Image (cartoon, helix red, strand yellow):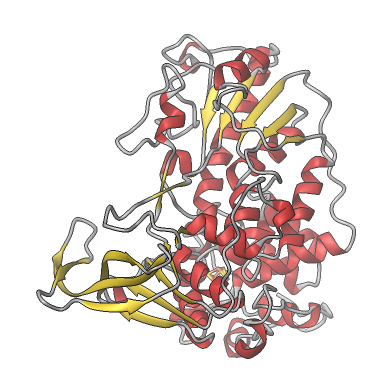
Amino acid sequence: MTNLTGMRPIDRKERLQIPRQPVPKQAPGDRISNFGEVYQGYDAETVIIEAERCLQCPDPQPCMSTCPMENNIPLALWHVSQGDFFEAYRSFRQTSTLSEVCGRVCPQERLCQGSCVVGAHGGEPVFIGKIESFVADYVRLHGGLDLKPETSTGRSVAIVGSGPAGLHVAELLALRGHSVDVYEAWPKPGGLLYYGIPGFKLEKPAVVALIERIEALGVRFICNTRINDPGQPSVDDLLNRYDAVLLAIGAGIPSVMRIEGEDLPGVWKSIDFLVTTNLPETDLPAGFNLPQIKGKRVVVVGGGDTGSDCVRSAKRAGASHVMLSYRRTEAEMPGRAEDRGFAKEEGIDYEFLTQPIRFIAGDNGRVAQIEMRRMKLGEPDSSGRRRPVDIPNSEFMVPVDIAVLALGFWPDEKFVKQVEGLNTKRWGEIEVDPDTGMTSRTALWAAGDAVNGADLVATAMASASRAAESMDRYLRILSNEYKILESEMNPTGVAVAA
Ligand code: SF4
Ligand code: SF4
């Protein structure tokens, strides 16, 4: 490998001696007053040095095998090290259309970066995610790729949901020449990316730009349309109107605690809290209540990424004190450690081994206190994490103005039950062929969190890649572009293939 000048070869030993290049960040004191991203991104000179740290490991590269999208990371990093950011972006796009998103929100420390061998050699792993988002942003800000759909196939696709899985399939199928309509329940497209992930992790202009890129391919976004609701099209209507349909509805049903006072005014569900703190009123559905957070005491319950997003949003919205309650210790927390580190720098208090047992109203009928109980760790449960166990007589009161429940999400069982003949699993996840994403209904696919349960963006996209591949093949079979083999017939008699 040579450096940017193309003159001097850099050997493995030299590469291992290059220190990790830091990415500029907003200081904690500055960033709590805005919703801008914490990381401010590499510049072109520094990103090249960081990419030169890659050892170009032989196949199988550990970083690729731990990337849910199986991105060709060494190839992309090699192009970056040569200063060819467009070619690097093309390398990522061989497998992923959302590098600007994954580079920002993947928990890279336990995926690609976590297995980078530079870490095993005593160095800090190559900052793969930051390089990936840099190249996507660079290409966007320098005119973008000249993406052109193939000749029209005359086939049409409806996608329900415009989160990561829906957008990924929309872009892939539009490029293959199919006509794609995307139905979105919220006023703007982007689903989780626009409404669920705060701007300090994924800036909204990056999401808007990728929607515009997909629209430029001819994809139509039909917003404010909740499929299967009264007065709105049903899934069967879409199946009658389009050649193929994808359900990419995510997993947006919040878990509840089932304790006293949970429905008091001032007790918020995490998604409602996030959208109202992160977005202008004009982006919200009519009649959405806006919480008054300035000067208020906020307690968030839950140790996942959503909990981190809520406490950090509350801080930025001007809360006087923000606390996160989690029933195990920090070691068992499922959320990303980096976000937690940022939250602590931003002044968030963590109360580990605590569990709310009831929400108590004040004189005005709004939540005013939370009765909490202290916990200790018991034996491991089925997930392998030690189970939280009550400590008797350990109850204490926490004064609060706003409580936010960030306890996880489930697929929308009510939605899927409305689709006749659609097989589901125990918690409402849609059952699909794992190789193709095809459901038990003819011409109906599903992908993302609706299939996997609430999971990572990259995991949702990986299942979306498989569905897009299968849908494209199915649509071409309809157009007699492929001969149908008996082995490609599913039990419904419709030809599909992996
Ligand atoms: Fe790493 Fe995620 Fe990008 Fe894969 S998709 S290379 S895991 S940041
Ligand atoms: Fe490069 Fe690290 Fe991947 Fe090896 S594991 S190819 S050093 S990024």
Q: Position of residue 395 (x, y in %)?
A: 19, 76
Q: 1 or 301, which is in the foreground?
A: 301
Would you place residue 126 above or below residue 160 in this image? below
Q: Specify the farthest residue to the front.
A: 363
Residue 88 seen in the current view: no
Percent position of residue 109, x then y: 48, 72
Residue 396 appears at what percent x and percent y? 23, 79
Residue at (51% x, 16% y) in the render: 442
Q: Quadrant of ligand 1?
A: bottom right
**For this rendering, which residue is in front, 367 or 322?**
367
Q: Left or right of 434: which side holds 313?
A: right
Q: Is residue 405 visible?
A: yes
Nearer to me, 207 or 361: 361
Residue at the far left in the pictured view: 392
Q: Is residue 75 above or below residue 351?
A: above
Seen at 38% across and 54% down, the residue is 263
- Give the x, y percent position of residue 175: 76, 36
- Quarter of the picture holding the N terminus: bottom right
Q: Quadrant of residue 103?
A: bottom right
